[in-house]
Structures are given as C-alpha cells and as structure tokens.
Image: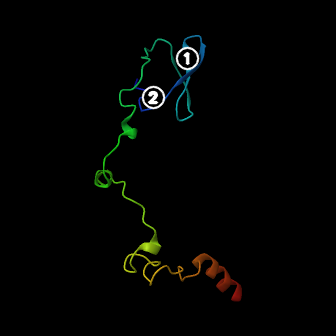
Amino acid sequence: NGQLSRAVGAVAKLIAKEGKLATLKLPSGEVRSISKDYSATVRQVGNVGVNKKNLGRAGSKCWLGKCPIVRGVVMNPVYHLHGGGEGRTPIGRKNSQLLGVFLHLEE
C-alpha cells in the first residue's frame, strides 16, 4: 500500500506474527496488522544527521524561520508592554488574570 516509518529516527517494531498477518507498532504508537506477503526493507535512512548540522551563523538559522527569542523586558516600549524604562526596571503591571479575580470579588 504505502511506506511506513521513513522519517529520521523512526522505528517500526515487529510485535507478533499470526497466520498470514504480522503486527507492527509504529512510531505514533499505532498498532497495525499487515500481510506477511508484503515486502520490507530493513535499513537506515540516509539523512540521519540533518538536525545536527552546524548552520554557521545566526542569519542562516533565521532563514529557516528559527529566530532568537527576545524577552519583552529588553525591548523598546513600541514593541512590547514590558519594554522601556531607565536601566533595569520591574515589569510595572500586575498579572491581568490575578487582577481580574480581585475585580470579580469586589462586585
């Protein structure tokens, strides 16, 4: 029918053989019965180290959409609520969820 377990690091385990069926456990946890008449290839996928590749610089990583995570406190006030201030300042706003609880209790 199709191909099973082709991704890097994906392994399908043969659990049992009963009659004309073989039971496989797929990486997703799904247990699937297939015919013993199907052919299988046991080998390693060729792109095993693809996620270990050193990209060399920050720009290369950004091209892949993996940009750095910047805290709101270090941003300018234009870009985030917690930004701005002289030196290191506290956030300056109470937790909105907690404030909502207090407002709800006063009613």
- Looking at the picture, how far across and down is residue 74, in whole percent? 43, 73
- Which amino acid does the dot numbered 2 rest on? Ser
Circle 2 is placed at which residue position? 5
Task: Out of 57 and 94, give the one closest to the viewer.
Answer: 57
Task: Out of 90 and 22, give the one closest to the viewer.
Answer: 90
- Looking at the picture, how far across and down is residue 55, in whole percent? 32, 46
The mark found on residue 83 in the picture is none
- Which amino acid does the dot numbered 1 rest on? Ala
Residue at x 50% of width, y 13% of height: 36
Q: Earlier in the sequence, mark 1 or mark 2?
A: 2
Foreground mark, 1 or 2?
2
Determine whether 84 is above or below 27 in the image. below
- Looking at the picture, how far across and down is residue 66, in whole percent? 37, 54
Circle 1 is placed at which residue position? 22
Tag 2, which secondary structure? loop
Quarter where residue 95 is shown: bottom right
> Most extreme residue toward the right, as rendered?
105
19 left or right of 66 in image: right
Determine whether 7 is above or below 107 in the image. above
